[in-house]
């Protein structure tokens, strides 16, 4: 596969599997980059998902993704983000029990800065870490309680996915998805609920190429409250998001992404059902050609589920649904998805690794 170092997906996103050692000095290494957002889940124990991000004051913070743990940011348990991974500063069983197996999903942002928010109401401080090559922006901002408050994301193009989480109090993870096609609708990353009307969360306004617009909802823009947002813009050969339509058949829909996926996250849009995550490190072969498929659920702390009747095939230019499970392939229903690349689809060896097709 002929792609250059600047376009190789694993320089910007990768899944890392590791085994806990129960110490407060364990280092997880061998990534091709220093991560800025690390999302961790135990594969073998009932524990919350946790994320660590580099954009907070003090450098690192963590908070849960599960409904039972919608609280704000807490005492850091990560000691450092390193050149090729991260180092723990805690023996917490949620991410470092001796002998337990874990999955971590890691994103690189990189370029940092700070400023004052714009739009309606009083401008507030924000800081960010952004990577325009991979279309990822991490933002820490203060709300002002006024509808029309705008927060710069610095991606230079419209993000199609925005996750927002209050960090100084209990609130859900609010998710804007461009593919839903209604700016008053949101999903909740920490819940299995269907799409919800929340007109005041994102002010009924799509993000544009410069800012994310928030309404007056205290969950996304409470006055003087602090928030974390992660925004993803679609990048040819690296990331894609959208909708597919289920058919309740193991010869299910094919979803074109323009690359072979490394990670796919799926949610049934209009019905109660868990989010599902699958990656190419926990499943090294396609389900349909043999082996079990290993699901993890962002809205639940349950252990990894193995099912040889459910799953996707990861193909060179997308993924194929091979399951009749209602959670990924209910007949006639919409499913939102986001995907990140293992390998881009490239035109030819002489094209310096430029992906052949756009997302």
Image (spheres, rainbow, N blue to C red):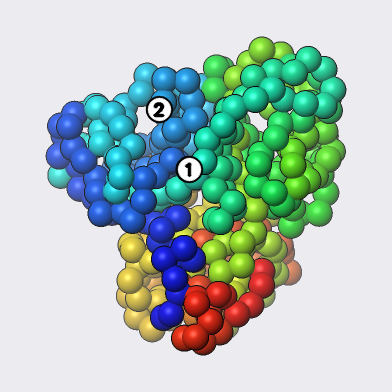
Quadrant of the rendering where the N terminus is positioned: bottom left
Q: Kindly give the residue lying farthest to the top in the view shown.
A: 224
Q: Which mark is residue 200?
A: none
Q: Is residue 196 above or below residue 224?
A: below
Give the alpha-carbon distance from disc 1 to disc 2, as whole Å: 14 Å
Image x and y of residue 247, in percent? 66, 75
Please name the residue that numbered disc 1 is placed on. 110
Q: Is residue 30 above or below residue 69?
A: below
Residue drawn at 48 percent across, 43 percent down:
110
Please name the residue that numbered disc 2 is placed on. 60
Secondary structure found at label 2: loop
Residue drawn at 35 percent across, 76 percent down:
285
Image x and y of residue 60, in percent? 40, 27
346 or 71: which is nearer to us? 346
Image x and y of residue 236, in percent? 61, 67
The reply, left or right, for residue 182 in relation to residue 353 is right
Residue drawn at 49 percent across, 85 percent down:
350
Quadrant of the rendering where the C terminus is positioned: bottom right
The reply, left or right, for residue 326 in relation to residue 286 is right
Secondary structure found at label 1: loop
Residue 344, visible in the rendered structure = yes
Q: Residues within 10 Å of mark 2 (few under 14, many from 20)?
A: many
Image x and y of residue 113, in percent? 56, 31
């Amino acid at each position: 596969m002929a792609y250059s170092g600047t376009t190789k997906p694993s320089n910007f996103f990768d899944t890392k599997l590791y085994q806990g050692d129960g110490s407060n000095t364990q280092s997880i290494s061998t990534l091709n980059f220093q991560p800025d957002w690390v999302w961790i889940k135990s594969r073998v124990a009932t524990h919350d998902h946790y994320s660590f991000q580099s954009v907070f004051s003090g450098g690192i913070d963590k908070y849960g993704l599960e409904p039972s743990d919608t609280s704000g940011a807490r005492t850091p348990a990560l000691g450092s983000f390193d050149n090729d991974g991260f180092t723990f500063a805690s023996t917490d069983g949620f991410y470092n029990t001796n002998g337990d197996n874990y999955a971590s999903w890691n994103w690189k942002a990189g370029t940092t800065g700070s400023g004052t928010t714009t739009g309606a109401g009083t401008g507030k401080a924000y800081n960010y870490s952004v990577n325009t090559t991979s279309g990822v922006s991490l933002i820490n901002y203060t709300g002002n309680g006024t509808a029309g408050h705008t927060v710069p994301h610095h991606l230079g193009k419209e993000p199609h996915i925005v996750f927002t989480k209050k960090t100084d109090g209990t609130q859900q993870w609010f998710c804007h998805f461009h593919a839903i096609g209604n700016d008053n609708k949101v999903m909740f990353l920490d819940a299995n609920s269907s799409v919800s009307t929340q007109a005041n969360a994102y002010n009924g306004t799509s993000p544009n190429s410069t800012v994310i617009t928030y309404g007056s909802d205290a969950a996304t823009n409470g006055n003087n409250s602090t928030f974390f947002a992660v925004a993803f813009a679609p990048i040819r050969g690296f990331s894609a998001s959208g909708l597919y339509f289920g058919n309740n058949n193991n010869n299910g829909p094919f979803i074109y992404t323009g690359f072979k996926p490394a990670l796919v996250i799926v949610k049934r849009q209009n019905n109660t059902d868990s989010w599902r995550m699958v990656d190419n490190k926990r499943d090294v072969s396609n389900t349909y050609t043999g082996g079990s498929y290993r699901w993890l659920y962002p809205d639940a702390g349950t252990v990894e589920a193995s099912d040889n009747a459910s799953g996707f095939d990861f193909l060179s230019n997308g993924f194929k649904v091979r399951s009749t499970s209602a959670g990924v392939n209910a007949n006639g229903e919409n499913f939102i998805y986001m995907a990140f690349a293992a390998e881009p689809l490239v035109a030819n060896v002489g094209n310096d690794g430029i992906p052949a097709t756009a997302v």
